């Protein structure tokens, strides 16, 4: 038995109202700055120099 068979028409309508696009947009990072932060492009980079690990400048 599927959920759509169990739910009433009123409940189905309420669920459709809750699926508004505004809630999806709020959880989705959209600015370039947020994407760079997520992807890690703003992090420090390191390299090995003489056996030590140093931060690249």
Image (spheres, rainbow, N blue to C red):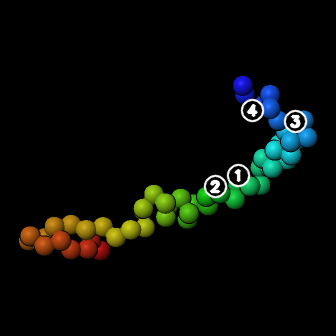
Mark 3 against mark 2, which lies toward the viewer?
A: 3
Q: Position of residue 5 (x, y in %)?
A: 80, 28
Badge 3: residue crowd in 10 Å (few <14, some 14–19, many ≥20)? few
How packed mark 4 is, by other alpha carbons closer than 10 Å (few <14, some 14-19, many 20 or more), is: few
Query: Mark number for residue 8?
Result: 3
51 is higher (above) or lower (below) than 22: below
- Sequence-wise, which precedes: disc 1 or disc 3? 3
Q: CA distance from mark 1 to mark 2?
A: 6 Å
- Which residue matches tag 2? 28
Cα distance in 3D space between marks 4 and 3: 10 Å
Q: Which disc, if any, is residue 24?
A: 1
Q: CA distance from mark 2 to mark 4?
A: 28 Å
Q: Quadrant of the N terminus?
A: top right
- Position above or below: 5 against 53: above
| Residue drawn where x is 8% and y is 70% of the image | 51
Q: Give the CA separation, mark 3 to mark 2.
A: 31 Å
* Image mark for residue 52: none
Location of the C terminus (image quadrant):
bottom left
- Callout 2 touching callout 4 (CB < 8 Å): no
Q: Quadrant of residue 7?
A: top right
Which mark is first along the chain, 4 or 1? 4
Q: Earlier in the sequence, mark 3 or mark 2?
A: 3
Please report the residue visible at 77 percent of the width from the left and 55 percent of the height from the top: 22
Query: What is the secondary structure assignment of the residue under circle 1?
Result: helix
Q: Which residue is mark 4?
A: 3
Along the viewing direction, whichever of 34 and 7 lies nearer the viewer: 7
Q: Check disc 4 and report its element: helix, strand or loop.
A: helix
Residues under numbered marks 1 and 2 in contact, where contact means CB atoms less than 8 Å apart: yes
């Amino acid at each position: 038995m599927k959920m759509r068979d169990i739910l009433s028409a009123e409940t189905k309508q309420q669920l459709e109202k809750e699926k508004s696009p505004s809630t999806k947009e709020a959880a989705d990072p959209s600015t370039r700055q947020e994407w760079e932060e997520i992807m890690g492009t703003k992090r420090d980079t390191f390299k090995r120099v003489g056996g030590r690990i140093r931060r690249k400048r």
